[in-house]
Amino acid sequence: MAHRINKEECTGCGACQSECPVSCISEGEGGKRVIDEAACIDCGACAAVCPVSCIAQV
C-alpha cells in the first residue's frame, strides 16, 4: 500500500514533503506535491500533517 495526493485539492504548501521520513514526496506541476508510490513506506506522516486532507491511502 502507499499514499496518493489528490492533485485537485493539493495547495502545494509542502507540509507533507517536509514530514516524509523517506523523502518520497516531490514538487510536481504547478507546485502540487507528488508521491513516489514505489518508495512510500505507508507511514501516514504526510496525511497527518496535510492541512486540506488531500492525501489518502491507495
Image (spheres, rainbow, N blue to C red):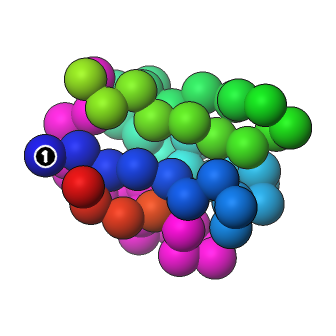
Question: In the picture shown, does residue 22 fall above or below 3?
Answer: above
Which quadrant would residue 24 be assigned to in this image?
top left
Residue found at the far front of this picture: 8
Residue receiving disc 1 = 1
Which x, y percent locates residue 18?
58, 41
Is label 1 in a helix, a strand or a loop? loop
Which x, y percent locates residue 6?
55, 59
Given residues 10 and 24, the one toward you in this image is 10
Is 43 colored magenta in this rendering? yes
Is 10 placed left or right of 20 in the picture?
A: right
Given residues 3 and 45, the one toward you in this image is 3
- For the residue carrying disc 1, how many other residues have a C-alpha within 10 Å: few (<14), some (14-19), or many (20+)? few
Q: Residue at x 70, y 30 (%)?
A: 27
Please give the range of residues in magenta. Answer: 39-54
Q: Residue at x 68, y 67 (%)?
A: 9
- Examine the residues drawn in magenta and state their main secondary structure: loop
Is 26 colored magenta in this rendering? no
Question: In the picture shown, does residue 5 fall above or below 35?
Answer: below
Looking at the rendering, in which quadrant would you find the C terminus? Answer: bottom left
Is 4 placed left or right of 39 in the picture?
A: right
Given residues 47 and 32, the one toward you in this image is 32
Residue found at the far right of this picture: 30
Which x, y percent locates residue 51?
63, 74
Which quadrant would residue 31 be assigned to in this image?
top right
Q: Residue at x 32, y 50 (%)?
A: 3
Is 23 placed left or right of 41 in the picture?
A: right
Is 31 placed left or right of 23 in the picture?
A: right
Residue found at the far left of this picture: 1
Kind of residue sitting beneath label 1:
Met
Q: Residue at x 76, y 54 (%)?
A: 13
Which x, y percent locates residue 48?
41, 69
